[in-house]
Image: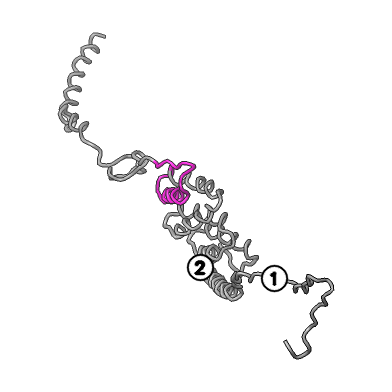
Amino acid sequence: MNKSYSLMLRVIPVILAGLLCAPGCTTKAAKKALNKPFEEEAYTGFAKDAGKDSERHTKEKEPIADDMDPEKAVDILVDHLQRPEPSYYIPAESQLRYWATKQGVDKIVVRKVRMLLKHPRIETRAPALRLLCTYGGKSKSSIGDLIEMLADPDYGMRREAFETLRGRTRMDLGYQPGAGDIARAQAMQRWREWWQEESRTLASTQIAAPKYEQPEPPKVIRPKAAPTMPENPDEPLPLPPPPGKK
């Protein structure tokens, strides 16, 4: 027992000395390693450039009051749709739907989101297409936009545009959103040709509204005055002039 204890007392100092003398493990090297900053964030979702916006440092959202000018409110929300942060673009769609329920604002929403249908990010294109499908109606611009969306690279986007287009026109023209590139391109060309002919037909059948003309005032027909009675009742009435004389 005493031999084992004495052996441990001899070995422990040797082990400690070896650890302290190992390269890279000195107290000076340890302090240097602890003070060395990391080259980049461990979470790549944050922006590397500290000057740019990220989920850690986001700009304060501009408040959108219910009585704000609709044009300005829609502009702010459309800008939020284009932001990369989910905290911006996710609630922007529901807020645009709320504003579209106000009288006349749905046309503003459709006019603004049309510009986002070719956006490179699907997180921006998808809500823009959904808003167009909901509030676009059967306007000429909306039908043309839906036809162009049949060429979107995303299958879900093509299907959404095609189902809305088929529901409004009661046609499919042989288009299938899941078909190959060549088949889709051929069917899309048929849609374009149909829409060009339809647009010319609509333009030629439009009837101009009649111009308003101020009606003439009605003519007042006055009765002929009765012959005056003479003051003397015994005096005969004047005879009418003979024919041919005035």
Residue range highlighted in magenta: 61-87
The answer to which image quadrant residue 27 occupies is top left
Query: In the image, which disc is placed on residue 220?
Result: 1
Q: Residue 106, relative to residue 195: is it above or below?
A: above
Q: Secondary structure at mark 1?
A: loop
- The residue at the point 52 percent across, 58 percent down is 157
Considering every residue shown, the one lying at the far top of the view is 2
Relative to 153, 243 lies left or right: right
Three-letter amino acid code of the residue under disc 2: Asp
Residue 136: where, in percent of width, then height? 55, 58
Quadrant of the frame with the N terminus: top left
Residue density around tag 1, few if under 14, some if 14–19, many if 20 or more, within 10 Å: few
Considering every residue shown, the one lying at the far bottom of the view is 244
The answer to which image quadrant residue 190 occupies is bottom right
Q: CA distance from mark 1 to mark 2?
A: 77 Å
The residue singled out by tag 2 in the image is 181
Three-letter amino acid code of the residue under disc 1: Val
Q: Residue 141, relative to residue 237: is it above or below?
A: above
The answer to which image quadrant residue 44 occupies is top left
